[in-house]
Each structure stands twice: as structure tokens, then as C-alpha cells.
Image: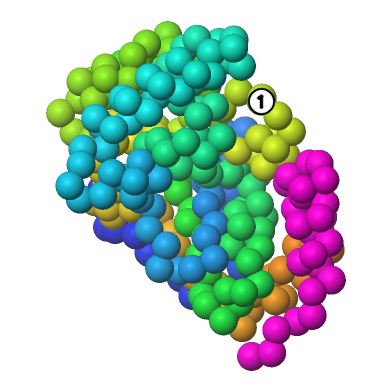
Amino acid sequence: MAATGVVSITIESWSQLMEEAYRDSWDSALNRHRSPFVYRGAPDARHELANSLLRLAGPEQSASSLERHLIRNFRKYAHSEVRDDTIWNWLAIAAHHALPTRLLDWTFSPLVALHFATANAELYDTDGVVWCVNHRETNQGLPGLLKNQLALHGSDVFTVEILDEAVDHLDKLSTLSEDDFVLFLEPPSIDSRIVNQFALFSVTSSADRSLDRWLEANTCCTRRLILPGNLKWEIRDKLDQSGITERMLFPGLDGLTAWLTRYYAPRCKR
């Protein structure tokens, strides 16, 4: 796989943002605009793609070892809440409920990613970022077993069922290849939040590897769209008018109150 590192693009206007967000979306095989990219937004451009497990473990502890303990106990105490007993289902549900794991949240929607980059008005003096990763490119680095599994199902990303057919234990993932790799996993639609956010997770073969460093060394299509702080208000207002709000992304009263609180807050002075 040719590697030229991650490209950072500073956005200067809404029109440029839309052009970059949907760049390379034309799929000639399908004769449709179907982007191969997935997106992750953050309010601070200094955001790194270190998973929550790495942050919890710190430099002195093995993230892989810690993950084993966390998942074992999560399964023990949450057993009555989960029906599908595959490890990937457990891992996805645990991450969805904020347990530290090797998984990172992504979305198929660039607008949803932009929401998360602009939802915090207290950081509008700070540049934000949207990561854009081509999952077809990252699939080129998958071991043969996993490539074949995707081809068998005619898919570009895994579901918990598809992945479990090939890898039924978390420790087995890192044994499939001497090189680290990354796959993308669609979680089960356990609630409206996952569905409305067009959510999926990245899964690293090693819990101890930061995703941004892997992308830097192994991809040539990855982009970081830098959102200047002085552009965030315009982006936020246009997302609100497009219906990309907490009310839609977090169905229920908590999402409603979060949207109302932010929507009616006065614009901060710069």
C-alpha cells in the first residue's frame, strides 16, 4: 500500500468544506455518488485518534491486558442486558455505553462528523477537525482471511455477525497478521442514537496502537479537514438549519434539552 501520510487541509469557506467532505464520492461501478470515506469530528484540531483504552491505561500499563479485564467484568455484570453473546457484540455495546475499549466512533455522514466538531460553543475560539478515512483503502491492509470474509458477503465494512464468522475471539485478531491493521465495524442497531448517527467503529488489531499513527504510515488518502474557529459559527448555523442537531442525533429528552440550550445561547464574542 503506497503511503504518503495524512494530508491536512485548512477550510476557508462552507462551499470548500462541502467540496472536500464529498470529494471522491462518485462510484463509477455503481454509477452513483457513494463515498468510500468515513468521518470523525472533534472540536479541537489537536485531537489525536488514541482510543479511550489507551488513555485509561497510560504509559505504564498494557492496554490489551486492561481491555481483557474490562470486557470480562462487563460481560459478567451486564449479562442480563445483552442477548447476542459474540465478543464483537459485547465490545460494540460496551463502547457505545462509554466503557474504555480499542474502538473509536466514526460515522458515514460528514455532516454528523461536523456536528461533533462544532457542538461545543465554548471551543469556538479553537480550530476543529474532521478526519476523513477511506475504508476501502484501509481494507487493503487486512489479512487475507478478513478480505475474503468481506468479499464473501459483498461488503466494505464488517458487522458483528460477519466478523464473528472469521474471528470468534478478541485475542485471535492480532494473530492474523504480523503487521498491525484496522477494520471498520458497524454496531448492532441497539438504539436510535446509533441509527441516526450513521455510526460505526474502527477496530485496531492491537489495542496498544494509536490509530492516527497507523494511518500516517499506511494510507495515502486520509485527510484532516481543519475548521478555523472563526468559521465554526457559520458551520453550526447551517447544520442546525439542515436538521443536524442533538435533537436528531440523541433522540429523547436529553438530546432535546441539549439542542435547545445550545441553540438559544447568545453568540460568544470573539
* Residue count near mark 1 (Cα–Cα under 10 Å), binned few <14, some 14–19, many ≥20: few
Which corner quadrant of the image does residue 65 belong to?
top left
264 magenta-colored: yes
3 magenta-colored: no
**Relative to 138, does residue 117 appear above or below in the rendering?**
below
- Residue 136 visible to an observer of this rendering: no
Q: Position of residue 41 (x, y in %)?
A: 54, 57
**Relative to 104, does residue 43 appear above or below in the rendering?**
below
Given residues 103 and 156, the one toward you in this image is: 103
Which quarter of the figure is the N terminus placed in?
top left
Q: What span is in magenta?
A: 243-270
**Relative to 25, does residue 67 appear above or below in the rendering?**
above
- Residue 175 visible to an observer of this rendering: yes
Query: Hey, what amino acid is under mark 1?
Result: Ser
The residue sitting at 53% across, 13% down in the picture is 79
Q: Which residue is mark 1?
A: 189
**Residue 176 relative to residue 133: left or right:** left
- In the structure shown, which secondary structural element does the residue marked by tag 1 occupy? loop
**Residue 42 relative to residue 264: left or right:** left
In the picture as drawn, the residue positioned furthest to the front comes out as: 77
Q: Position of residue 111 (x, y in %)?
A: 67, 55
Given residues 120 and 99, the one toward you in this image is: 99
The residue sitting at 79% across, 80% down in the picture is 266
Which quarter of the figure is the C terminus placed in?
bottom right
**Residue 68 relative to residue 82: left or right:** left
Q: What colouring does the structure picture have?
A: rainbow
**Residue 265 relative to residue 175: left or right:** right
Q: Position of residue 220 (x, y in %)?
A: 33, 53
The residue sitting at 83% across, 61% down in the picture is 260
